[in-house]
Image (spheres, coloured by chain):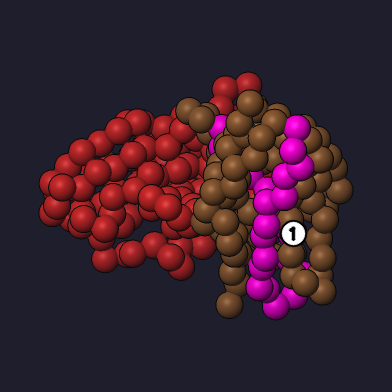
Chain colours: A brown, B red
Amino acid sequence: AQRVTQPEKLLSVFKGAPVELKCNYSYSGSPELFWYVQYSRQRLQLLLRHISRESIKGFTADLNKGETSFHLKKPFAQEEDSAMYYCALSGPYTDKLIFGTGTRLQVFP
Amino acid sequence: EAGVAQSPRYKIIEKRQSVAFWCNPISGHATLYWYQQILGQGPKLLIQFQNNGVVDDSQLPKDRFSAERLKGVDSTLKIQPAKLEDSAVYLCASSNSGRVTDTQYFGPGTRLTVL
């Protein structure tokens, strides 16, 4: 079955500390993977996607097919990074998104 | 460009009542999605339209939920009759053409409380 697992409901760090939001998936085939973010009082929006291999707002995510993981990382957290982060996947031939349960990141000053 | 619009933003009803939500996608976007997000969970796709045709409604509880996109632009999602477990945020999203490479843009959501 297709599934996205985000094991941490809450991750709290201090400003300047490294951040790693964990995401594991199960999928028979080669999925496309995404990170979505929802800042307070804002809409859910795309942060980055695996196929673009991009870095957005200092965040990167590497697909590890052996470990079926797509962890989101940032070397130095900022207070404005505080938000809800959702990992999601879709198939190579469908854009239907399957979301994880989300991790709330709190960055303290 | 204007984003995805949804109304109402909040709705409180009693169980067994009916409710309808409206969504207007980004202009020119052919694909429209309705998601249900229950508290503490990620969004779950209920139905996907490509223009005015249904692409995927496999997770739509069809005994009580219905959705339409008659002219291939705006859409309505209806629940009749509502149950307590339907309390959730209902998100509408749209994308250019529904390809995997397209970005889905989300609306602000409608928070439904069923008492």
Asked if residue A19 lies in the magenta stretch, the reply is yes
Q: Foreground residue, A100 or B51?
A: A100
**Residue A68 can be seen in this image:** yes
In the picture, which quadrant includes the N terminus of chain B? Answer: top right
Q: Residue at x 33, y 64 (%)?
A: B61
Q: Is residue A69 left or right of residue B112?
A: right
Give the percent coordinates (x, y) of residue A29.
75, 75
- Label 1, residues with CA under 10 Å away: few <14, some 14-19, many ≥20: many
Q: Is residue B101 left or right of residue A105?
A: right
Magenta region: A16-39
Question: Which quarter of the figure has residue B2?
Answer: top right
Q: Residue at x 79, y 51 (%)?
A: A61
Asked if residue A26 lies in the magenta stretch, the reply is yes
Give the percent coordinates (x, y) of residue A45.
61, 38
Q: Which residue is mark 1?
A: A70
Give the percent coordinates (x, y) of residue A96.
60, 59
